[in-house]
Image (tube, helix red, strand yellow):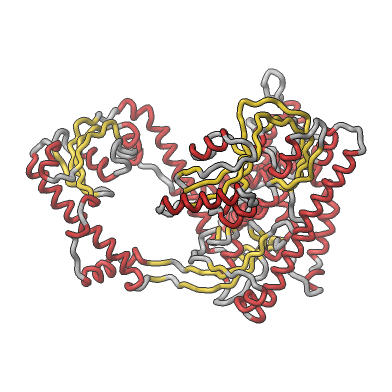
Amino acid sequence: MAMMAKMRDLAPAFIITVGVLFVLFMVVSDSNVLEAFGGRTNNIASINETDITYQDFMIYVERARENQKAQTGQDIDEENMEQFRDQVWDAVVTQTLTEQAIKKLGIKVSDEEIREVILGPNPPEFLKRNFIDSTGRFNREFYEQALFDQRNKEALLQAEEAVRQTILSQKLESTLYASITVSESEIKQRFIDQNVKMTADWVIVDINSISDSIVKFEESELQKYYKENSDKFSIESQRKLKYVNFKLAPSRKDSNAVFQNLQNVVDKLKNDTSDFKSYVDIYSENPYSRDTVSVEALPVSIVSSLVNANPGTIVGPTAIPQGFGIYKLIGSAPSNDVLVKASHILVQATGDDVKDFAEANQIYDQLTKGADFASLAKQKSKDPGSAANGGDLGWFGKGRMVKEFEDASFSGNINVVQKPVKTSYGYHIIKVTDRINKKFIVEKIINSVKHSAITRDEIYNQANDFAYLAEKNGFEKEAKIANYQVAESTPFNKDIYAVPGIGYNKGLVDFAFDNGLNTVSSVYKTTNGYTVVMVSEIINAGIKPFDEVKVEVEGLVKREKKFEKALAIANNIKSKVGGNLSKAKEVYEFARYDTSANFTTAGSIPKIGIEYAFSSAAFKSELNKVSGPVRGLRGYYLFRTLSRNDFDNTAYSMQRNTLRDNIYQEKKNSFYQQWITQLKETASIKDNRHLFFGR
């Protein structure tokens, strides 16, 4: 409720900006003009017959967005907007259902109750804070003057509404939490969980130490286990979707447009005396910086242009990972790090070293007789990454290559083909093409390549056309004609938010469960673009057939058989070692003995981990007496509690109220979440958001 109260605080500037348009939209929506002309409904959703209009929902989104910006200083980017709208939608559903529940429960707030809060001895903090003087004192006189000033009438109405919502929330909480109690035994157990520490030595007979070969079972035992544990093989209602993704990516036109824009910038720079920084400030997506960078950090396409260039040289536009860039060379600086540029031809190791060496020498001979290195690398090299580039490995420093290759590269003469060098990969014929020991000082203009509105519309139209044809002629048939790749999700249930293989989109989950087999969807906006789906399989809730889970049943039966054997082994150890658990290995060689100190009934046990059965038994056991066997997660334990501090009544008295309050708060949170979940599960919610946010 606190979150929703914040969402109601619409800034006056925002009201002024959108007020006229909002009124116009409301007139249009109230007159049902869209529906009268056969258009889609203006309602984005219906929650128990309470309509949520598109305009109402967008106001919620914008309020939440402004709150986000105010709190974090960052706006929601387009990639995360869909997920953000889903979060707002969930808040709207929660608020609407809560308001409906308040009305159903008959909870009301009178004007008198609101006045008592505002005019009472301790007004709400959001009102008081504007009337605190320099000494920190609340100026009651100024406060009351402001309340009764007619100029503040609108602000007072907003304050009254905020107080009304607060009182409603408090009354709802009182109604919901009236049945929550915290018993004395719960408080004591929480104190024990946090304060009573124990030390114990122990032995575990781990079921993983028992060989599969000694575990035998009959088919009838599998059938019996399956029948007696059918709940383990139950499945919820599930769906599978076949889908075609239309990735939202920049087109060649988008790329060419960015390149041409930067080319125009280069042309301007050639005839302009303005400093480069002014162009960075205007045209670059990244802020201005003057960087000293190594050759490795520069785009491969411009390095050769910069190596022998004069200061002031401008290079580009050139392709970079994020788009295109223009670089201006300011100068260079000496570097202690030497970099080399080299090419190689790899004769991959086959296991026959004589043959491999002979092949490498044959290639070397061809090169010494004038064969073109790049051409031969494309034909002969078994290094696919560099072979396509004529053997070129680009620039690299020390520590990047295996030692033998590195030694040859850094000691070899430039443009001289070296004799074959052997490494763990095979034989390399290496030619060092350049060497440098300096860094470059550069300024740069960077532009990323993004999809344009035209490209987005083209991709959406492709998806929309496919959706239309797929519904008419068949999903897979149309996908095959258009050469679209069809994929299929794994089964999923209704509670998930991300469809396997597609990603986050609750609308698609709802579509899958609201429609029948082979139903084709309209276009849905997804994280990476657009998606059209078809319900490909409906899996009803029930018990999986035995044949389908037989392998799983075998594993579970085998596990239970091992627990039975572990129990027998543990009892045998207990009968033979007396009170000395350290002798367990003499009885069973795979037994593990150790000691754990200072553990509680609720935490992780040193050297064991989380084992509540063990810690609970240790708390209840007699000191210095071998106890067990106790079944844990991995096997059976024998143990001896060596020490356990007593229940401290004085400490308990000091902590009791805090412990009670913590437990009560936990119960409240849990109860509220369960209540909201139940409201959502039983509500009639019609969600049409995908009709409004498809693009």
127 lies above or below 562: above
Q: Nearer the viewer, residue 52 or 396?
A: 396
The outermost residue toward the bottom is 473
- Tell me if 163 is positioned left or right of 419 in this view: right
- Determine the image quadrant of residue 380: bottom right
What residue appears at the point 62 percent right and 47 percent down from the top-left corner? 392
Instruction: Give the x, y percent position of residue 671.
Output: 47, 50
Q: Nearer the viewer, residue 573 or 238?
A: 573
What residue appears at the point 19 percent right and 69 percent down from the top-left corner? 218
Q: Nearer the viewer, residue 678 or 293?
A: 293
What residue appears at the point 38 percent right and 67 percent down from the top-left corner? 234
What residue appears at the point 46 percent right and 72 percent down from the top-left corner? 539
Question: In this orientation, does residue 106 appear?
Answer: no
Question: In this orientation, does residue 368 appear?
Answer: yes
Q: Nearer the viewer, residue 584 or 169?
A: 584
Instruction: Give the x, y percent position of residue 572.
Output: 10, 48
Instruction: Give the x, y percent position of residue 447.
Output: 76, 45
The outermost residue toward the front is 369
246 lies above or below 311: below
**Quadrant in which the C terminus is drawn:** bottom right
Count of marks overlaid on the render? 0
- Determine the image quadrant of residue 310: top right
- Tell me if 405 is positioned left or right of 629 in this view: right
- Determine the image quadrant of residue 575: top left
The outermost residue toward the top is 135
627 lies above or below 529: above
